[in-house]
Image (cartoon, rainbow, N blue to C red):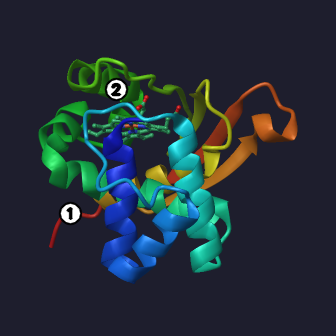
Amino acid sequence: MYGLVNRAIQQMVTSRHGEDVWQRIKEKADLADLDFFSTYQAYPDDVTHRLVAAASEELELSAAEIMHAFGEYWITYTASEGYEQLLESTGETLPEFLDHLDTLHARAGLAFPQLQPPSFRCRHGGDRTIDLEYHSHRRGLAPMVVGLLQGLGRRFRTDVQVEQTAARDRGDGEDLFHIRYAESTPPS
Ligand code: HEM
């Protein structure tokens, strides 16, 4: 995945746990020789997986917990790294935003030409519910999607409850998330 992703993991770890912890994670991931990740360089997915596995060991959290925290972090990280406008133009409400996730990644693809983005499809229920399909050629990232949805809930000041109702890792044909969201609270 692009360096932007690995940099975000680095920033999440250093801001929450400090530089020493990050250095130990880098070593455990066999990346001690790497000085920094370049935002616009595409790294093998294995690099990201090794970082998550090493962080999981070092922080004594499951890989799913790390991915969940990372998904939530990604929303504020991308906003602070120059993509706030892209986020803004994707939707003014949570359901509108979720309808346009593929457009968001298509636009991001202009800056990241080798992007291999996920794809999402929404089915809206009448009672503030959405069933969200998630498609990716990668495996194991569903916990990140739950974190992303929580992060979006925070961005839109909306209480969000997410339940994964189908999972490729459990043998289902797709990853499916049932989302319940409350009305947004206006900024104070
Ligand atoms: C402006 C904000 C965003 C930018 C710039 C962005 C960009 C990216 C980039 C560069 C990757 C790595 C993929 C690769 O290198 O091939 C990625 C992956 C991913 N993005 Fe986004 N993204 C943004 C927002 C979002 C949001 C709001 C979601 C919410 C669902 C999302 C869901 C994902 C997921 C799940 C992946 C993991 C890759 C996979 O599933 O195969 N992204 N994105």
At horizontal 58% and vertical 27% (from top left) the residue drawn is: 136
Mark nearer the viewer, 2 or 1: 2
Q: Secondary structure at mark 2?
A: helix
Q: Position of residue 95 (x, y in %)?
A: 39, 38
Q: Secondary structure at mark 1?
A: loop
At horizontal 37% and vertical 53% (from top left) the residue drawn is: 34
The kind of residue on which mark 2 rests is: His
Q: Position of residue 87 (x, y in %)?
A: 22, 40
| Residue 53 picture quarter | bottom right
Is the residue marked 1 within 8 Å of ligand 1, measured from its CB? no
Give the residue at mark 1: 186
Is the residue marked 2 within 8 Å of ligand 1, measured from its CB? yes
| Residue 17 picture quarter | bottom left
In the rendered image, the residue lying farthest to the front is 33
> Toward the viewer: 102 or 74?
74
Task: Point out the image quarter for the N terminus.
Answer: top left
Give the residue at mark 2: 105
Q: Position of residue 45 (x, y in %)?
A: 53, 37
Q: Is residue 13 above or below residue 182?
A: below
> Toward the viewer: 3 or 171?
3
